[in-house]
Image: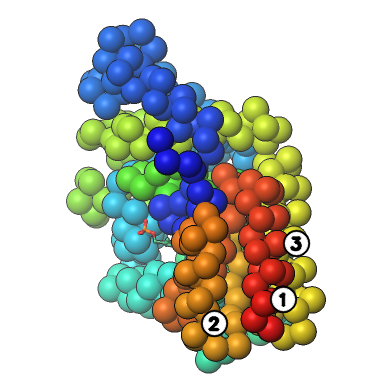
Amino acid sequence: MAERVFNFYPGPATLPLPVLETAREELLDFQSTGMSVMEISHRSKQYENLQNETEARLKRLLNMGDNYKVIFLGGGASTQFAMVPMNFLSPEKTADYLVTGSFAKKAYQEAKFYGHVHPAVDTSGENYRRLPRQEEINFSDNPVYVHLTSNNTIFGTQWQTFPDCGNTPIIADMSSDLLSRCFDPEPFGLIYAGAQKNLGPAGVTIVIIREDLLAKANPDLPVIYRYETFVKNNSLYNTPPAFAIYMVSLVLKWLEDLGGVKAIEKINREKAAVIYEVIDQSNGFYRGHAEKDCRSIMNVTFRLPSEDLEDKFVREATAAGLVGLKGHRSVGGLRASIYNAMSYEGCKTLAEFMKDFLAKNG
Ligand SMILES: *Cc1c(COP(=O)(O)O)cnc(C)c1O
């Protein structure tokens, strides 16, 4: 078998090795059923238990009370860009959007189909290299919700503290940093995350909804687009993406065994610091895209003095077993995605490679 590499792809992304090993072990026989979890009915007791356990574990990890409901959906985070306004916006109402990156902008554009949308801030003019200060955010008078992206995957910025939105529920796309750090769930009415960055494989999107917001959802929607449908039916209204949910359950168990979100946050901060340190001590050879006080601990974006050097970096890094480092075309350069499953060792190896590359090419 080929040796495993350090995988810095932005998503789908690296998964914890013990998780993959357990999945391999259980692939032909899930919980002594004589069937794979892929083959078993989603109405079976074994499957239902698995899903209930996954939900309970997630809420435990996030310190969330019973007023939050977890549902499992298909369609990726992008479907939530539309489902959120379908459920909570209407032609006579306004929702505020904090446009701080490409995904945030897509969410904002989808919402326009359903009602008034107000860009309370838009940092595209600075190629999304920073997040706004509280006083730069221009909320509308009475928004039904404020939508934000907690971590801007492409640009490598991350809200360090969430903005104060008063009593307006925050709806957050946490696709690339849910479970990477502790936060107070209270201001959030709804949180969604595609699994393929920090939570598992592609195919399932996790949505967490607070009951009081759910109660305000539009009733005049096709059944399949109502959050209510999935909450009422325990995400078993129709066939859920069972294998992806199973993989998420293994990732959550791995995280819980490791000590939970607080423990992983500490590791994540150390991982990010070891790479940012090389950037900051390179005398401008490596240039971070994000402003320092907005830096993400999940996606580290940086450029080199020329595109030729950037190509060379990617080529040589790949040959050294450091894979998936090419940046998104809208930023260029390099991006190291260092989600929960990326080890400190992987980040340290990348940092050493960067120092070495600088010594040879600087
Ligand atoms: C990747 C990503 C998305 C898009 O997710 P899909 O599952 O491909 O629809 C949306 N938001 C953020 C923050 C992302 O990182």
Pick the front one: 95 or 46: 46
In the picture of the structure, the residue carrying the numbered disc 1 is 359
Q: Is residue 87 left or right of residue 188?
A: left
Tell us which disc is closer to us: 3 or 1: 1
Residue 172 located left or right of residue 40? right
Kind of residue sitting beneath label 2? Leu
The quadrant of the picture occupied by the N terminus is: top left
Tell me which image quadrant ligand 1 sits in. bottom left
Label 3 amino acid? Answer: Ala
Mark 2 secondary-structure assignment: helix
Query: Is disc 1 in contact with disc 2, using a CB cutoff of under 8 Å?
Result: no
Q: Earlier in the sequence, mark 3 or mark 1?
A: 3
At x 71% / y 33%, what residue is drawn?
259
Which residue in the protein does label 2 denote? 309
Determine the secondary structure under disc 1.
helix
Residue situated furthest front in the rendering: 360
The residue where tag 3 is placed is: 273
